[in-house]
Structures are given as C-alpha cells and as structure tokens.
Image (cartoon, coloured by chain):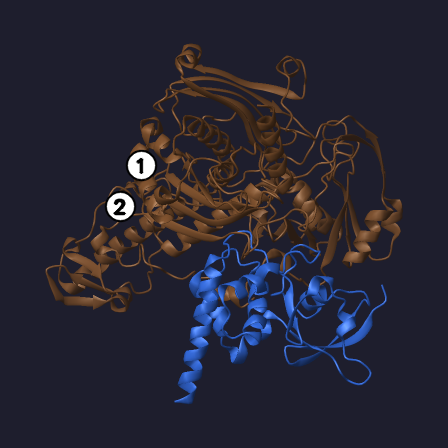
Chain colours: A brown, B blue
C-alpha cells in the first residue's frame, strides 16, 4: 500500500537505514583520484599570492605596485585593501590581504609580492586575552563590550544556604581550524560575463551569490564547482577576500585561470579562529550534593567582532545564578564557526567548576551528576541512560577513586562530562551547523517517497490493481496481498516510457523526519607524568544520542573524529600570539600541534539507538561530540594530579605550574 | 626562472619534465605530471599528506628537490612510487580497499599519505602489532576522521592479502 505521509520506516522494515554501509566515495579517496580544489591544474593557469599586513592594527597609507607590474611573468595586480578601503584603510589583524598578484608560477608571484611597497601607520593593538578584564575599565573602553548581566533566582541567599562552595578559573584559548586542505580557489572567466569558480568550501550553493555581490555581477553568471573538500569544520562557509581576489585577478589577466590557495602560515593565522572563553566561577551546594548556586564572571575574544555572550552554566539549569560577561575586541583574525560554536568552551567552564565542587564535597562526579540529574531537563533521562552506558564501557565505578588519591607518577584517572546540542540551526543548504544529515536525508526521503508514489500510480494499471494496494519491496513493485502479482523495478520503470520521473524533495516539509537537540556523555582516562607534566590519553568513551542513525559507520566516524579533535584542543592547540608584534607565533604544524595516532589512546563510541531515540528522527552529529572532550580530559587530569589546571590546552608547562602552585599552598598550610 | 630537463622514475615509468632546478618533488608530481594524489598540507614536513615512496622508503615530497633524485649520468635513479602507483593492474590494492571499507577516510585529504606509509610498513613488516602501526603512522596527521579505523583497515588488508595468497596457491 502506498503511504500517504512521510514517515521513517519502523525498525522491522528498514533495509539500509542503520546498516554499516561503506562510504560511497571511499575508493576514489583511497586511490588518490579524488580531486580537491588544491589539485586543479588548468591550462595556462596563473598562480596567485598576496601582500599581507605585518601589523595587528594599522592603517594603509600608500601602495606602490609599479615595480611588480613591470616584472616578467606577472600578469595581474589587484589592490584588495587600499588606503580608501574599509575604515580609511584600517587593518584589524596581522595577515590581512592588501594586494594580490597573479604570475606564471609560484616563485614569480612571490617575487612580485616582495616588490610591492606598502606604507603603514601602526596603531595600538591588543592580542592577548586570558587576563581577567577589570569591569570598571571594561565599561569605559572601546575594546570591551559588556554583553550581558543576568540574575536567575536569588543567588545571594542561595550561596548563604550553601554548605560547600568552590571558586576557580576555567577556560580555553583561541584555536584555529587548521583544515588540511587550505582555503582557496581557482577562478576563470570563460567569457567576459561569466565566472567559473572552483573553490574549497562547505557552501557550494551559497558561495556564488556571495561572489556575485562582491564583484557586482549577476549571481546566475557565476558557476561554482567543487568535487571534494579537504576539511572545513565551519571555517569554509563564507566567501573570503582571497576568493574575490582570484576572480578579480583572472578578469584582469584576460580570463585565464588563477589559482589562489593559502599557504599554511596564512591558513593558521587568518583562516581559522575559534573564540576564547574564560571565566571565574563560584558554585555552591548542600552537603548532600544538591547544587544550589552559580556565579560567573566570564570573558572571551575572537577578533574584531567581540564574541557574543556565553550560555553558562552549560546545559545545567542551576536554580540560582548571577552572571556577567565581557566580550573583548582584539586584533587577531576574525572568528569563524567551529564545530558547535562556543559549546566546547562553555562545557569546559561548566563541567570544570562542577567537577571541582564535587571533589570538594568528596563525591564521585558520576554521583554528583545523578544527584542533580533533574537540573538537566529536558534531557535528564537521556543523560542518565547514557551515564550508565558510559559507566559500563569505562568501568567507571570500579575504577574511580577520590581526587589526587594516587601514586606520584603515571596516575591513570577518569573523569566525566556532559554535553548537549540544542542546536536549533535551521536546515540550510551549506554543509555546516550539523544540518547536513538532517537536511539531506529528510529532503531525499521526501523526494524518494514522492517518486515511489508517482511510480506506483503509473504502474498500477499494469498489475490490474489500485495504487493503494501496491507496495515496494525487495526490488519489486507488488500487490501487497498477492506477492505473485509483481513487476521488477526495471519493468516498473519501463512503464514510465519516455516520461521519466523527476521529483524534488524540499526542506522544511511535511512529516516528522528530523529533530534537534541531543545529549551525550564522555569519559576520559588519562595518565599524567608529574615530573614532565605530560598528559597521556589512555582511553576515552563517548556515548552519543543523535536520534535515528541512518549510517552507523559514518556517524561513528564523525564521533571518533570529534574526540580526536577534542584531544587536540584539550592538550595541544592554542593560537599563540606575540604581544609586542601582534602576530601569531606558531604558524606551522610543527608548533601548532594536532594529535597524531600515538596521542589519542583507545577510543570507544556507542550510539544510543532503539526505542526512545529512533522515533525522534534524524539529528546531525557533526558538532555534538566535539563539545565534551575538553571538559572530560581536563577533569581527568584534575582527578589524577589532585589540582585543577585552569586553562586549556593542558600543556606540560601549565600542568607543572598547577602542581607547583598546589605544593606551595600545601607547604604554607 | 630557467628550466632544466630532468628524468624521473615514477611508478615504474620514465618521465621527462622541464622544471626549475629548485622545484620540489611534490610540485613536480602535482603540476608537471598531474599526479595530484600526493597532497600539499603543511608545507614543512609536519603532516605527511605528501608522502611518497623513494626506493620503498616513505619520504616527504614537500621538502625534497625533484632534481636531486633524477636519473644521473650513469642512468641510475631511485624509484618513486606515488598513490597512483599503488593501484596495481587497475585494481585497488588491498590496503586502499580496506581504507574505503573501514572508514579510514573522511575528507580524504590525508588518506593517500597514510596509505603510502602503510604500504611501506607492510612491505617491511607483514604482520605489524598495534604498537608497530602507531609508530609507523606517527608522522601522518588526520584532522577529521581520526585513527581508530586505520588499525581495522590495516588488519583487514593483511587478511585480504593472505587470503589472496592462499587462493593463488590452491
């Protein structure tokens, strides 16, 4: 029988959904045949490069490109940011593109860049951001945006009622996306009105219009193409100045292709930025663990636009709260969406403070969370179930011991943290905001359902039946009550004759196919060498809910990738800025370290499926599992060494500093 | 810049290219020979995306001058193997198939470099332990999928190879 609504099939009727399918593009990627934007070599292609501002805050006073223009092999020069551009030539971060050139090869393009003279007027800059801003100063300074003050309940009397309180600092620095394929594009003009843009992007459908607007041409004349993207993580959603420059250079050079890919240093310095978030937090509870009160003074920065307020305490509906937040404007490359924007930072702050409070109460954090599980409304039940699963996978209860209650060297300890989505992102066409699976699968499902319905209507007469009596199963269209009356899929389709079915599925649409807002639990088991300060991950467990799982292998792959990204940002990643010059110091992958295969330990993923999860429909998984690893690892380290290392990444120097400070305090006591 | 004609041995073939004397092997492979499976990632030998085999040893082509391993006056040159040369007789080698099957690739940009490293590992050590795998792959970085599936892929490839050899003997 033909369904009249859009509904995911029941578990008993699923053929492919939930099966361990291989990536369709696995073979093309594993054989090296997959073409990325960076791989394109077009006939007569020119290579682009650019002059970048060496100062964090400056004004462009003059530009002289005459020497470069006369160089053999230089085919086009284009000023991106001149004395009259933007706020009178003002530049807000080091690495800003000023002038772009296109030449016959990369060495010539580099030489041309060196031959361009730019005069700057240097202006005062601010790049550091982990110092607590003075509120009185903040209210006067242009660099501080006092974004929010909020009170919930009656925090003053709640703290008076609290039998145990804890106060501490928590936070994580600015990190950069570090896509393995850098940002960039290859632009060419097949004729003077049409632009063909190959671009490394997460947003093929949207980028054409952005380019068209930037260079004032009809969007319909921009053809955007990309076969594969070498990582984006949120940083490749919008159009960048170098993308526009490639198009302008190509136009000036008579339409020949111009390839403009960022080098690694520029990629790290300007093409990625997850804002920082820091907080001084005070929390209070009753002796039995009942969480009563939260007070926080938080701040963060992420380039010229101060980041918006932080929703802390993250996930926890603490009944009494007093919160202030200051967004700091600083002179670094602008922030970009980063897998679950702000969520990992909020999770680190919240779970760090609560974990310290539990330690002070002498409670296992697992018990503390269970005790206060109602404050995790509306996902209390999910978190509670996930905690139990994670406990089994990690053997938490069998292995947990009180904080610092361990030997002096190589102490494996566990920690726990909670995460949540509430990702109310609208389903859009870009591959970001964890909307891809929800958007793609539901639209595809609607289209497929419509196509099936139309096909059944066409072939019903051939089977001497009414459309409502037919079903599609096992590659055949058949009469539901009499399987002997059937047509193969091919025979059925041949009844369509020359009129093929073209059906478009749309979002949003009818039917409860997708959902948003998920919960997950992660636990980490680490060893800390207290002589060297080196943290080693032994094992991590992620228990994740994402509604109906369409393709478990790829969903697990997303979670594993997120955990590894988490190990990287928890232990290694930080955009290190030089206060004097205002430039980024670690602009290579030797010093901007990512976790390698030997750094990640054993990783265990469990997706929550079955009743209670499946019927919620499809929910994106790209972002949620990146939320908790920082908190889980930070808490595990605190448990192992008996003291909190306040800020991520948990580098050896920070670990040793925290240990020394604790010993000093112990000595005085 | 003035170009020079050099001859390289790539994937079992002799290839002549006219390139700048200082041109990197990676750029020569990608731009002059259209072998774009080897990727430019970090520019400075940190990430392993450009890994190729030079006489069977994994080398980082982003920091190697192409002319330095070209055919010399006596007609000798090291044999360069890229990801394109791993697919023997048009079929994917076991390790490539296993990477696809086990989800060792997500964005896939780092994958060819990993596969070259794995190929060298398996030729040296046909039954590597997890520790051997960790050690061998420690110079390759992945930003999105991670590493867990790679152990499974490598073991599956070894099993497939062994079954293939056993089948051939029957």
Q: Nearer the viewer, mark 1 or mark 2?
A: 1
Quarter holding the N terminus of chain A is bottom left
> In percent of the image, x 78 and y 38: which residue is there?
A54
In terms of secondary structure, where does tag 2 sit?
loop
* Residue A198 % position (x, y): 60, 53
Image quadrant assignment for residue A419: top left
Of label 1 and label 2, which has the lower sequence position? Answer: 2
- The answer to which of A489 and A190 lies nearer the viewer is A489
- Left or right of A289 in this view: A31: right
- Which residue does the numbered mark 2 point to in the structure image? A6
Give how far across and how far down residue A450 sits, in percent. 29, 51
Say if B59 sits above or below A184 in the image.
below
The count of marks equals 2
Characterize the local packing of mark 1: few (<14), some (14-19) or many (20 or more) Cα atoms within 10 angstroms.
many
Q: Is residue A193 visible?
A: yes
In contact (CB < 8 Å): disc 1 and disc 2: no
Q: Tell me the SS state at disc 1.
A: helix
Please give the chain letter of the residue carrying mark 1. A
| Nearest to the observer: residue A431 or residue A55 | A55
Q: Is residue A431 visible?
A: no
User: Where does residue A373 sit, x and y in percent of width and height?
Assistant: 33, 30
Q: Is residue A27 above or below residue A293?
A: below
Residue A188, percent across and down? 66, 54
**Callout 2 environment at 10 Å: few (<14), some (14 to 19), or many (20+)?**
some
Mark pair 1, 2: CA separation: 31 Å
Q: Is residue A1 left or right of residue A396?
A: left
Q: Residue furthest bottom?
A: B170
Residue at (64% x, 20% y) in the render: A133
Mark 1 lies on residue: A384
Q: Which mark is residue A666?
A: none
Chain letter of the residue carrying label 2 = A
């Amino acid at each position: 029988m033909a369904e009249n609504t859009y509904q995911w099939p029941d578990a008993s009727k699923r053929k492919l959904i939930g099966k361990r399918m291989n990536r369709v593009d696995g073979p093309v990627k594993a054989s090296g045949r997959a073409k990325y934007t960076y791989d394109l070599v077009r006939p007569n292609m020119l290579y682009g490069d650019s002059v970048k501002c060496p100062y964090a805050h400056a004004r462009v006073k003059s530009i002289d490109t005459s020497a470069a223009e006369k160089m053999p092999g230089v085919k086009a020069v284009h000023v991106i940011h001149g004395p009259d551009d933007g706020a009178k030539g003002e530049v807000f971060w080091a690495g800003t593109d000023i002038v772009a050139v296109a030449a016959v090869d990369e060495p010539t393009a580099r030489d041309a860049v060196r031959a361009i003279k730019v005069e700057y007027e240097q202006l005062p800059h601010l790049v550091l951001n982990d110092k607590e801003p003075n509120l009185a100063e903040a209210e006067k300074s242009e660099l501080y945006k006092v974004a929010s003050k909020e009170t919930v309940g009656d925090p003053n009397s709640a703290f008076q009622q609290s039998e145990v309180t804890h106060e501490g600092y928590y936070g994580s620095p600015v990190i950069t996306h570090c896509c393995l394929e850098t940002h960039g594009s290859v632009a060419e003009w097949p004729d003077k009105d049409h632009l063909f843009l190959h671009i490394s992007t997460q947003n093929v459908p949207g980028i054409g219009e952005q380019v068209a607007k930037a260079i004032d041409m009809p969007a319909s004349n921009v053809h955007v193409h990309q076969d594969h993207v070498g990582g984006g993580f949120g940083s490749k959603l919008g159009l960048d100045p170098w993308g526009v420059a490639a198009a302008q250079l190509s136009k000036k050079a008579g339409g020949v292709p111009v390839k403009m890919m960022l080098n690694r240093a520029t990629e790290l310095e300007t093409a990625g930025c997850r804002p920082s978030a820091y907080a001084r937090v005070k929390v209070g509870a009753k002796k039995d663990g009942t969480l009563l009160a939260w007070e926080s003074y938080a701040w963060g920065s992420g380039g010229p636009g101060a980041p918006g307020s932080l929703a802390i305490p993250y996930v926890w509906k603490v009944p009494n709260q007093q919160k202030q937040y200051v967004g700091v404007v600083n002179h670094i490359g602008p922030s970009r969406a980063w897998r679950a924007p702000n969520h990992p930072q909020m999770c680190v702050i919240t779970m760090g403070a609560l974990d310290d409070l539990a330690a002070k109460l002498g409670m296992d954090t697992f018990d503390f969370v269970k005790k206060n599980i109602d404050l995790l409304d509306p996902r209390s039940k999910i978190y509670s179930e996930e905690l139990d699963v994670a406990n089994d996978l990690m053997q938490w209860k069998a292995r947990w011991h009180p904080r610092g209650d361990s030997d002096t060297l190589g102490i494996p300890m566990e920690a726990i943290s909670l995460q949540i989505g509430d990702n109310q992102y609208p389903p859009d066409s870009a591959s970001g905001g964890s909307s891809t699976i929800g958007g793609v699968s539901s639209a595809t499902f609607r289209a497929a359902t419509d196509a099936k319905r139309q096909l059944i209507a066409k072939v019903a007469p051939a089977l001497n039946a009414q459309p409502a009596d037919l079903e599609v199963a096992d590659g055949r269209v058949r009469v539901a009550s009499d399987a002997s009356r059937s047509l193969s899929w091919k025979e059925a389709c041949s009844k369509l004759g020359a009129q093929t079915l073209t059906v478009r599925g749309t979002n949003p649409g009818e039917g409860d196919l997708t959902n948003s807002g998920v919960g997950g639990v992660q636990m980490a088991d680490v060893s800390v060498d207290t002589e060297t300060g080196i943290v080693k991950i032994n094992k991590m467990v992620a228990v994740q809910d994402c509604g109906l799982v369409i393709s478990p292998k790829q969903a697990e792959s997303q979670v594993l990738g997120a955990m590894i990204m988490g190990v990287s940002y928890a232990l290694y990643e930080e955009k290190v800025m030089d206060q004097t010059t205002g430039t980024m110091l670690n602009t290579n992958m030797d010093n901007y370290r990512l976790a390698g295969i030997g750094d990640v330990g054993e990783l265990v993923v469990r997706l929550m499926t079955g009743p209670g999860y499946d019927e919620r429909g499809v929910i994106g998984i790209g972002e949620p599992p990146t939320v908790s690893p920082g908190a889980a690892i930070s808490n595990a380290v605190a448990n192992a060494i008996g003291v909190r290392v306040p800020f991520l990444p948990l580098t050896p120097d920070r670990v040793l500093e925290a240990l020394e400070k604790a010993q000093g305090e112990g000595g005085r006591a | 810049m003035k170009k020079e004609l050099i001859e390289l041995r790539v994937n079992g073939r002799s290839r002549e290219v006219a390139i700048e004397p200082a041109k990197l092997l990676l750029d020569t492979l990608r731009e002059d020979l259209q072998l774009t499976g080897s990727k430019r990632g970090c520019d400075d030998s940190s990430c392993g995306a450009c890994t190729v085999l030079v006489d069977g040893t994994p080398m980082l082509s982003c920091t190697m001058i192409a002319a330095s391993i070209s055919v010399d006056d006596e007609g000798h040159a090291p044999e360069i193997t890229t990801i394109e040369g791993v697919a023997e007789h048009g079929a994917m080698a076991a390790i490539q198939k296993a990477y696809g099957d086990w989800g060792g690739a997500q964005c896939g940009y780092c994958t060819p470099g990993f596969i070259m490293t794995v190929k060298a590992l398996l030729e040296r050590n046909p039954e590597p332990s997890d520790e051997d795998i960790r050690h061998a792959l420690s110079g390759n970085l992945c930003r999105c999928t991670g590493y867990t599936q790679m152990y499974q892929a490598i073991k599956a490839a070894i099993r497939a190879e062994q079954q293939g050899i056993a089948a051939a003997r029957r």
